[in-house]
Image (spheres, rainbow, N blue to C red):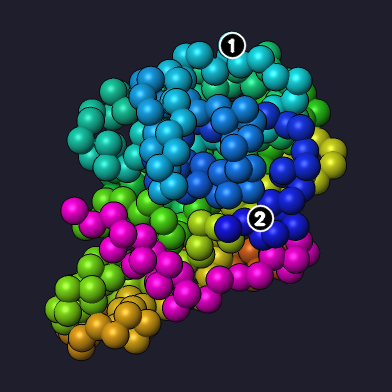
Amino acid sequence: MLEPAIAHAIAAGDQHLAITGAGGWIGLATLDLLEQALGDDVVRRVSCYGSAARPLTLRSGRQLNQRPLSELSALEARTVWLLHFAFQTKERAEAMSEAEYRTANDAISATVLDAVRTLPVEAAFIASSGAASKAADPLASPAMRLYGQMKLDDEDRFAAWAQESGRRAVIGRIFNITGPYINKHQAYAIANFILDALAGRPIEVRAPREVFRAYVAIRELMSLVFALMAETGGGVTRFDTGGEKLELEAVARMVAQALGGGPVQRAAITDPVADCYVGDTASYTQLLARHGIEGVPLDQQIRETAEDMQATAG
């Protein structure tokens, strides 16, 4: 659930909540949180947009209709808060040519920017990525650099909109998150560890280098996002997600402890160059405190993520 005071404020408000990329991991988790806050009113207060029209099924069994992104500009509402999650992922950057990838993401951005310039959007959340910090990193993969650069471009476009229009843009660089609707289990280390633990297998950390990550729960992240969107006045607020910085072996041991999993097997570290994908934890922690949001401990994040993965297995 969202932080209770924030959920209450959303329920008591009258703004319409428009979500792009609603069918992705963060989009679906956000819809779930909004359903918990709004109840049946979620149907009236929230609209969903994505690559194509289709029903989106929440954990409660409720279905919400996703409309094509091209219909966003036709939304009729007095006041709009936009949550912008639509983007071609790094995995798509690996599968597409650079030209195709740039064209696809530029088209998404142009569609959403055209809409926010004409709709009564009071505040917008732009879900950026920690990859933006890797855009010029020579050690990052070409797909990571391309993805990161396009996320940077998106940050700049929406920041310019906010500054020009006097509206509010909240730009969050999301590094590592946990929680319901986690997808692509093989792509995320923590999901792999949870699968191993649930199956009673040894948890394997195969990376031949030190790998550092820091995790936050989606419900914690979105509580902060809504709190920042509710701040008065226009302008741009930027933040990184935080969390405790841990090497993957420590993460694996926490998974094993939280879920009663088996032993942890760590591959030998033969590469001296560490992989560190962690945001500005100090600033993030200060933002949480300022808005009275309680951070979710990693062991609780693990249990919540595992419960959802178990509930939806098969």
At x 28%, y 63%, the residue is 310
Q: Is residue 109 magenta?
A: no
Magenta stretch? 288-314
Q: Quadrant of residue 289?
A: bottom right
Q: Nearer the viewer, residue 221 or 5?
A: 5
Which one is in front, 35 or 198? 35
Task: Judge the density around disc 1: few (<14), some (14-19), many (≥20) Cα neighbours within 10 Å.
Answer: few
Q: How much space separates mark 1 and mark 2, taking CA atoms?
A: 29 Å
**Would residue 156 be seen by someone viewing this image from the given angle?**
no
Label 2 sits on what residue type?
Leu
Task: Name the mark on residue 102.
Answer: none
Residue 182 falls left or right of residue 7: left
Q: Which residue is mark 2?
A: 224
Main secondary structure found in the magenta portion: helix
Q: Quadrant of the N terminus?
A: bottom right
Q: Position of residue 242 (x, y in %)?
A: 55, 65
Residue beneath disc 1 = 74
Q: Is residue 306 magenta?
A: yes
Element carrying mark 2: helix
Give the image quarter of residue 3: bottom right
Give the side of residue 190 with respect to residue 226, left or right.
Answer: left
Name of the residue lying farthest toward the right: 233
- 122 with respect to 207 (left or right): right
Q: Is residue 74 above or below residue 23?
A: above
Q: Position of residue 28 (x, y in %)?
A: 44, 43
Answer whether residue 66 is visible to the viewer in this image.
yes
Type of residue at label 1? Answer: Ala
Which residue corresponds to the image point at 23% horizontal and 28% vertical from the top-left? Answer: 97
Q: Give the SS element for disc 1.
A: helix
